[in-house]
Image (tube, coloured by chain):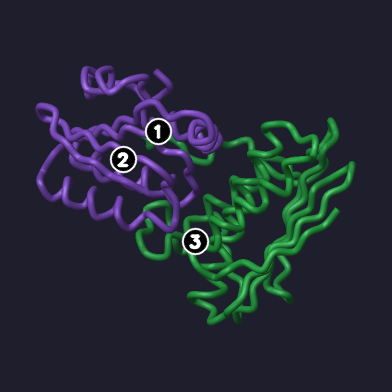
Amino acid sequence: MQIDTSTKGDAVLVTLAGRFEFGTRQDYKQVIAQIVQDGYLRLVLDLEQVTFLDSSALGLLLLTDQKFKLKQGTVGLVNPTGYVRQVLELANLPRVIPVYDSVEDALQASPSQEPGLC
Amino acid sequence: MQCVVRVAPTDAGVSEARVALLEWLHPLALTGSQRFALEFSTHEALVNALVHGIREGGGSSITLTVHADDERVRIAVKDDGVGFRWALPGLAAESPADEGSGSTGLGYELMRRLMTRVWFTTFQNGIIMELHRGRNRRCSSPAPVYPILSAPSA
């Protein structure tokens, strides 16, 4: 899985590409740990180029959301497609973490945005 | 129709087996949701065998067996590790926040939602899943009515 990170104002945009699964979870965990350590409170995860997602990845997304909420921060997911969207909806993840159609929508969202498919 | 795949006990081996499964299923007249159910559930079972049967259980081999007829698709994933341990929701010490083995029980719950039936074969250290292809395919193991992941209370 390829992971690219950039800052957008007070937010961090993490763009994931490829297979997000048990075998690739360590790379993701390291990136998120660094972002949390750096003190950012807004995280946008661009999932548009993710082609596969399993329950291990779902657990990590939930864990990421919990870490940010503990610090009154926010996490948003952007444009999951096809198989990945099916997995997220199967697990009801959009009820916990808001899902946006674009990075711009996620960056403009209010921190109090209710979870759901936007 | 039946095929048996010896799965290399590695992350890459799990991915290769999933691809092999999709190729084998290709000529079957399955719906998109049926393919999704089989792909997701098989991956979860293979990862479980890799983690608990091979890496924690000292095993060395994983076998994927797929059988299909007009009524159903049955998938068996078995390993030769010392024990079989699913992180069952409500029973496991792990939580969705577990960062160690990656076990959360979530994979099992999602498999139960997707497949018609799921069995554990503790004697032979494996899991068997069945997807009925007919209209009333959910004849048992009904999906839970509660959301698997619920929003934290305010």
User: Can you say whether A105 is above or below B101 in the image?
Assistant: above
Quadrant containing the C terminus of chain A is top left
Q: Residues within 10 Å of mark 3 (few under 14, many from 20)?
A: few
The 10 Å Cα crowd at callout 2, few under 14, some 14 to 19, many 20 or more, is: some
Q: Is residue B149 above or below residue B52?
A: above
Label 1 amino acid? Answer: Val
The residue under label 2 is which amino acid type?
A: Asp
Q: Considering depth in this image, is B83 or B28 the residue closer to the camera?
A: B28
Circle 1: is it few (<14), some (14-19), or many (20+) Cα within 10 Å?
A: some
Colour of the chain lettered A: purple
CB atoms at circles 2 and 1 under 8 Å apart? yes
Q: Which mark is residue A65?
A: 2
**In percent of the image, x 43 and y 30: which residue is there?**
A80
> So how many labels did they put on this image?
3
Helix or strand or loop: what does disc 3 sit on? helix
Q: Distance from label 2 to label 1 (Cα)?
A: 8 Å
Percent coordinates x, y for residue A21 in the rendering: 44, 51
Chain (green): B
From the viewer's perspective, tell me whether residue A8 is left or right of residue A25: left
Q: Earlier in the sequence, mark 2 or mark 1?
A: 2
Residue A96, label in figure? 1
Nearest the eye: A70 or A9: A9
- Residue drawn at x 42%, y 65% is B101
Q: Which residue corresponds to mark 3?
A: B12
From the viewer's perspective, is residue A45 above or below residue B11? above
Front residue (pair B15, B149): B15
Q: Which mark is residue B30?
A: none
